[in-house]
Image (cartoon, grey):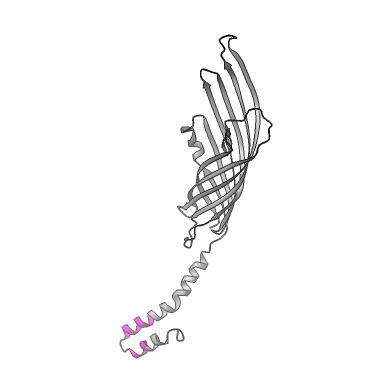
């Protein structure tokens, strides 16, 4: 303290009033030790590597918007401090629909699973100690296996009468690449909420099925090579 603050210390020795002298000495001690206290606080609570699990609530609620369609989706990953994350997510999708129009009628059902893996880079740099907020850009590769079938296909014909068809269960596989942007906001020590928007592009589809399904699990509608998806996640984080 004598080397760092000699002027303040000599001022305290010159002052005769004991209370003022104690106040000046207290200021000198505070200036001397406060940087060390702050550094110790940061060292006590370092930003560590973390594991997380997340659940997507939108997949269950989606049937309110698209009748007959719902998904169960989970996500897990490893976060390197607050810099980047390696993630894996996957889920199950089910879709059923009854179609009846002037051309045909049928019952359609499909189900399938998907898995997706990649990395996410945090571009948010305003975290304070103990905060884990993310604004991330990501890239992932996904794979889906979807099975579907249609029963009781009826095509009316005024000359030949009604014609009846059906196709049994068929499997459809797809591989896609996606780029995403998302947000994760810390609510409590281990709890966070977030969302993710994905732009996906089909890069491989074997021609093993004669009819493609309405929806590809984890991707979206199958009648186009590009799709935009949205997920809302509830996170639980370990190790911080």
Magenta range is 11-25
Q: Residue at x 57, y 40 (%)?
A: 226
Instruction: Decide which of 105, 112 is in the foreground and name it.
Output: 105
Q: Report the number of discs.
A: 0
Residue, far bottom: 14
Q: Residue at x 51, y 46 (%)?
A: 196
Residue 170 position by quadrant:
top right
When the figure is inspected, residue 187 is found, relative to residue 31, above or below; the finding is above
**Left or right of 38: which side holds 113?**
right
Q: Residue at x 52, y 68 (%)?
A: 43
Residue, far front: 159
Residue 6 position within the rendered picture, expressed as x and y whole percent measured from the top left: 42, 87
Residue 49 position within the rendered picture, expressed as x and y whole percent measured from the top left: 57, 58
Q: Check residue 137 for magenta coloring.
A: no
| Secondary structure character of the magenta stretch overall | helix
Residue 42 position within the rendered picture, expressed as x and y whole percent measured from the top left: 50, 67
Residue 38 position within the rendered picture, expressed as x and y whole percent measured from the top left: 46, 70
When the figure is inspected, residue 43 is found, relative to residue 78, above or below; the finding is below
Instruction: Decide which of 177, 92 is in the foreground and name it.
Output: 177
Q: Residue at x 38, y 85 (%)?
A: 8
Quadrant position of the N terminus in the picture: bottom left
When the figure is inspected, residue 143 is found, relative to residue 50, above or below; the finding is above
Q: Check residue 19 for magenta coloring.
A: yes
């Amino acid at each position: 303290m004598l080397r760092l603050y000699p002027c303040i210390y000599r001022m305290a020795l010159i002052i005769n009033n004991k209370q003022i002298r104690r106040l000046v000495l207290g200021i000198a001690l505070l200036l001397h030790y406060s940087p060390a206290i702050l550094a110790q606080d940061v060292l006590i609570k370092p930003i560590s590597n973390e594991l997380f699990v997340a659940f997507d609530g939108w997949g269950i609620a989606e049937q309110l918007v698209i009748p007959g369609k719902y998904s169960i989706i989970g996500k897990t990953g490893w976060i390197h401090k607050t810099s980047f994350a390696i993630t894996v997510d996957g889920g199950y999708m089910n879709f059923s629909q009854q179609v009846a129009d002037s051309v045909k009628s049928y019952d359609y059902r499909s189900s399938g699973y998907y898995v997706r893996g990649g990395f996410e880079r945090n571009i948010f740099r305003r975290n304070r100690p103990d905060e884990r907020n993310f604004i991330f850009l990501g890239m992932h590769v996904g794979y889906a296996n979807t099975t579907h079938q249609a029963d009781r296909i009826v095509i009316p014909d005024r000359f030949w009468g009604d014609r009846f068809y059906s196709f049994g269960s068929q499997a459809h596989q797809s591989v896609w690449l996606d780029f995403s942007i998302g947000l994760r906001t810390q609510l409590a020590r281990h709890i966070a909420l977030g969302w993710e928007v994905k732009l996906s592009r089909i890069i491989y589809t074997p021609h093993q099925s004669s009819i493609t399904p309405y929806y590809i699990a984890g991707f979206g509608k199958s009648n186009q090579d590009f799709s935009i998806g949205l997920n809302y996640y509830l996170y639980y984080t370990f190790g911080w």
